[in-house]
Image: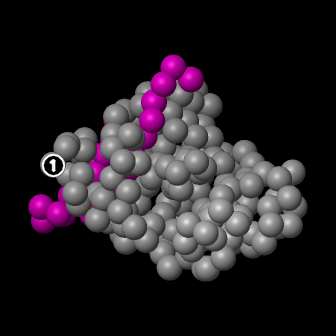
Amino acid sequence: MTLLHERGVLQVMLDATEAGRPLYETFGFQQLYRMEIWVREAREPRAAEMSNVRWMVPDDLPEVVALDAELYGLPRPQVLEARLRPAWVTVDSGKVTGYLLSRVNENGASLGPWYHRSEEGAEALLSTALFEIGDRAVRIDIPELNSQAKTIATRCGLTYRRYCTRMLYREQPPWHMTDQYGIASFATG
C-alpha cells in the first residue's frame, strides 16, 4: 500500500471472495456491497421484444463512454471497446439512452456493463441480448443494491449463483456504480 500512497492513488477498489475478504480488511479495505453472480445455463433462447434496441455501431461509442462515465466516475473507453462484440444500445430521439456490452466465447457469454435510465429499457436490452446470444450459457455480475436488475434477471430466466464483496481502500467512490444493472467484470468494474 505504501507504493500506492507514494504514487498518489486516492482509492483502490476490488471484489473479494469470502475467503479473501478478511485479508483485505487487514490492509484497511472497507466493504461497500456485494456483487452477485447471476447465470443462465445453455438453453434455447426465447423470443425478445426488440422495441428501440439495436446493435451498437462504432459511432455510438462516444455516447456510451459518456453514459458509463456518469456511473463509473471516469471515462474508460478501452474497457468498453474490449466488449463491443456483440453490443446493444437503446436510442430515443437519436440519443443513446442505454447499453449492454458483452464478451462471447466458446464457453458462453459474459454480459456487462449494462445500464439504462429505465427498468423497461434495461429489460429490453437484456431480453434482446439473451435472444441474440442464442443457446450459450450467460453470466452477469449485478450489484446487490440494484433490486431492479435482479428482478429483470429473474424474469429473463437467470438465477443467482454466488457473490463477491466489493471493497474499497481509502476515499468513498464519487460515482453511482450501484445504478448499473451489471458490471463489465470483476477485473474492470
Residue 41 location, quadrant: top right
Front position in the image: 167 or 156: 167
**Image x and y of residue 154, in percent:** 59, 52
Residue type, label 1 = Asp
Please name the residue shown 63% across and 47% down the image. Answer: 38
From the viewer's perspective, is residue 69 above or below residue 170? above
Q: Which residue is mark 1?
A: 59
- Answer left or right for 20 relative to 101: right
Is 76 in the magenta?
no
**Image x and y of residue 176, in percent:** 49, 74
Q: Which residues lie in the magenta part?
A: 86-107
From the viewer's perspective, is residue 46 above or below residue 116? above
The mark total stands at 1
Front position in the image: 150 or 27: 27
Please name the residue shown 87% across and 61% down the image. Answer: 22
Q: Main secondary structure of the magenta part?
A: strand
Please name the residue shown 72% across and 45% down the image. Answer: 161
- Answer left or right for 130 relative to 29: left
Indicate the quadrant containing the N terminus: top left, top right, bottom left or bottom right.
Answer: bottom right
Label 1: element kind: helix
Is 104 in the magenta?
yes
Q: Which residue appears farthest toward the front when viewing the image?
A: 6
**Image x and y of residue 114, in percent:** 43, 54
Q: Which residue appears farthest toward the left when viewing the image?
A: 94
Front position in the image: 13 or 189: 13
- Number of other residues with Cα within 10 Å of mark 1, as a class: few under 14, some 14 to 19, many 20 or more: few
| Type of colouring | one colour
Please name the residue shown 50% across and 60% down the image. Answer: 181
Residue 82 location, quadrant: top left
Residue 164 location, quadrant: bottom right
